[in-house]
């Protein structure tokens, strides 16, 4: 089980704002994926969860244009660090800035 952490207070605030607009089922599914299996999976060509690898980070599109970008640390403790929470445009700006 991965511990969910945030890279800063602004990211945590945006993440909580995104969660506020989601249904209970979507929140439950999001937490389950992030805590239990945050890596992209494929089986027989079908994507089981929508996690994508984007540069050095992983991206989980929630609903519509909202996304969460995170990094995974295995040692010394299983940690998932959320580095960006926002819409599609914010994702593109973030990835462009980080991958330079």
Image (spheres, rainbow, N blue to C red):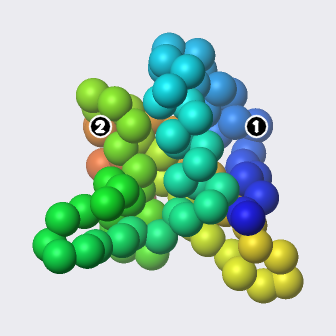
Residue of label 2: 89
Q: Is residue 71 left or right of residue 51?
A: right
Q: Is residue 50 visible?
A: yes
The residue drawn where x is 55% and y is 65% is 37
Q: Which residue occupies the foreground of this view, 77 or 25?
A: 25
Secondary structure of the residue carrying tag 1 is helix
Q: Residue furthest bottom?
A: 75
Disc 2 crowd, CA 10 A, few/some/many (<14, 14-19, 20+): few
Dot 1 or dot 2: first in sequence order is 1
Pick whichever, 90 or 19, lies toward us: 19
Q: Residue at x 78, y 85 (%)?
A: 75
> The N terminus lies in which quarter of the figure?
bottom right
81 sits to left or right of 92: right
Where 73 falls versus 12 (above or below)? below
- Residue 13 occupies quadrant: top right
Numbered tag placed on residue 9 in the rendering: 1
Element under label 2?
helix
Q: Is residue 80 above or below residue 27?
A: below
Question: In this view of the protein, can residue 96 be seen by the observer?
Answer: no
């Amino acid at each position: 089980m991965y511990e969910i952490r945030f890279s800063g207070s602004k990211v945590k605030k945006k993440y909580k704002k995104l969660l506020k607009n989601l249904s209970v089922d979507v929140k439950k599914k999001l937490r389950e994926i992030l805590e239990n299996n945050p890596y992209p999976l494929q089986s027989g060509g079908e994507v089981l969860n929508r996690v994508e690898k984007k540069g050095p980070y992983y991206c989980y599109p929630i609903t519509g244009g909202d996304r969460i970008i995170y990094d995974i640390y295995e040692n010394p403790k299983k940690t998932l660090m959320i580095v960006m929470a926002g819409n599609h445009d914010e994702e593109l700006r973030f990835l462009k800035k980080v991958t330079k």
